[in-house]
Image: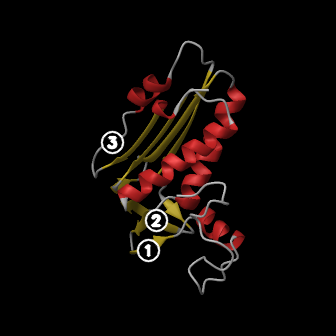
Amino acid sequence: MADESNNVIEILEENIPIDFAKYISYIQAPHCGAISTFFGTTRDNFNGKTVVELHYEAYVPMAVKCIKSICSSARSSWNLNGIVVIHRLGSVAVGETSIFVAASSVHRGDSLDACKFLIDEFKATVPIWKKEVYSDGEVWKENAEFMDRRMDLGDDGMNGGYKKKGCCRKEDKVGC
């Protein structure tokens, strides 16, 4: 199993596009038969509204800490060579990629499963906030994975998610 030094985690400032080839070449290796990827792109609609762009903000030090924890959890579950998690901040136009996740491994099962885990945990726990900008307004959005995690923790919306346990306690599978 590769060590944590073969993780690439970056939060890109506004107007910096993701260089996919650069990140793929970083985790590619002769002994790896699989590289699985996820590209999260801005779609042009949501619930019948025309989406113009998405806008992202983050508390970067905490986001990086959370992503590192997610990568450690992935490495403890799958035999991975490399992991890449890149997210853009600022405005991301329709058709552009806001998040890129990749995992490389000897066999496809490990990289495919890890890639799904990485994006799902990212959306549930990492403090990056998304505003959908529509042709007729805008709204800050919560990820469905975040809301599902709150319900799993027993949060009824009245106490900030601490009814049973918080997101950053040792007993949680992934803590930030």
Lower sequence index among marks 1 and 2: 2
How busy is the neighbourhood of tag 2: few (under 14 within 10 Å), some, or many (20 plus)?
some
Placement of 138 over or under 63, stated as above or below: below
Numbered mark located on residue 50 in the image? 2
Report the residue at 58% width, 27% height from top.
Answer: 104
Q: Which residue is mark 3?
A: 17
Placement of 20 over or under 15, stated as above or below: above
Residue 51 visible in image: yes
Lower sequence index among marks 2 and 3: 3
Which type of secondary structure does the marked residue at label 1 adopt? strand
Q: Position of residue 163 (x, y in %)?
A: 66, 80
Report the residue at 66% width, 83% height from top.
Answer: 156
Which type of secondary structure does the marked residue at label 2 adopt? strand
Out of 75 and 151, give the one closest to the viewer.
75
- Residue extending furthest bottom? 158
Numbered mark located on residue 46 in the image? none
Lower sequence index among marks 3 and 1: 3
Report the residue at 48% width, 30% height from top.
Answer: 6
**Label 1, label 2: how far apart the Cα atoms are:** 13 Å
Q: Position of residue 21 (x, y in %)?
A: 41, 27
Numbered mark located on residue 139 in the image? 1
| Quarter-of-image position of residue 125 | bottom right
